[in-house]
Image (cartoon, rainbow, N blue to C red):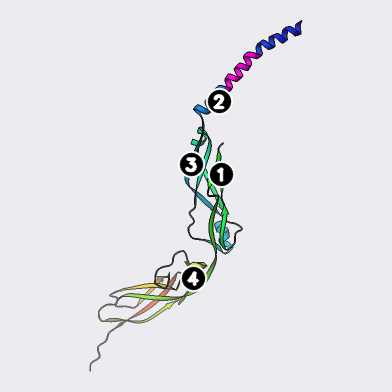
Amino acid sequence: KGKIKMSKVYKRNLTPKIIAILFSLMLWIYVMTAINPRVTNDITNVNVQLMNVEEIRQQGLVVVGDLDYNIRVRLTGRRDEVQRITRDQIIAKADLMGYAIGINNVPIEVFVDGQVEVDFSPKFISLELEEIVRRQKEVEIIIEGSPGEGFVIGSLDFKPTVAWVRGPESIVNQVNKVVARLELDGERKNIVQSLALRPVNSRGVEVQNVEVQNPFTDVILVIDEVKSVPI
């Protein structure tokens, strides 16, 4: 009889327990769907960090062109989780180690600290690697202006007369020569200066993204006085 009585009590308590569980489940579903629903947020212009750039440079390779790559990241999840994630908390990386000269499609990895689903586009960045080369170019001194009245430009001497230019092969090949500018403004004495060197192309336009490894030349310009000789 005792066992039968306990069974009846258990059955009487089971129904309200099931109702309470179902009510709690419905309340949780309501909270999740109405108060904290699933949402999607697109975050644009997330910058991609290029990894091991310096390491591949030490191996004699360099990225040609723009190093600024951006992607669009889509976050999906509960609203409170999605809304707390900012652009700065999204880490996108592309590892350049192991790629060769030429155009490479490098996969992107995205890391987000949060309970959200992550999708992004594009999945790869296309970049070109070139060999770093070193070429010797002639130095030219460009003299602008004039010495003082009664004086003329005499002999010009400068060292070094050649300079090493280093950088991506396609850009170094654009360098025609290395120039230094010497500006005169009525000088009456010899000029001794150290002038900065700039790489220029065949049109005289400065070439960017290359390094002149001996960036200065020492110049000696003689200023001669004009002498009148009686006839």
Name the residue: 69% across, 9% down. 9
In-image side of 15 versus 178 (left or right): right
Three-letter code for the amino acid on which mark 1 is drawn: Phe
Camera-side residue: 208 or 187?
A: 208
Q: CA distance from mark 4 to mark 2?
A: 67 Å
Name the residue: 61% across, 19% down. 21
Three-letter code for the amino acid on which mark 2 is drawn: Ile
- Confirm or deny contact between disc 3 and disc 1 (CB under 8 A): no
Q: CA distance from mark 1 to mark 2?
A: 29 Å
Camera-side residue: 92 or 144?
A: 92
First along the sequence among labels 2 and 3 = 2
**Residue 201 figure quarter:** bottom left
First along the sequence among labels 3 and 1 = 3
Q: Is residue 72 magenta?
A: no
Discs 1/2, front: 2
Determine which residue is flagged by label 1.
111
In-image side of 104 versus 143 (left or right): right
Three-letter code for the amino acid on which mark 3 is drawn: Asp
First along the sequence among labels 4 and 3 = 3
**Residue 111 figure quarter:** top right
**Residue 29 shows which numbered tag?**
2
x and y percentages locating residue 47 in the rendered image: 49, 49
Dot 2: within a 10 Å radius of its alpha carbon, few (fewer than 14), some, or many (20 or more) residues? some
x and y percentages locating residue 92 in the rendered image: 54, 48
Q: Which residues are magenta?
A: 14-25
Secondary structure that dominates the magenta span: helix
Determine which residue is flagged by label 3.
42
First along the sequence among labels 4 and 2 = 2
x and y percentages locating residue 62 in the rendered image: 54, 62
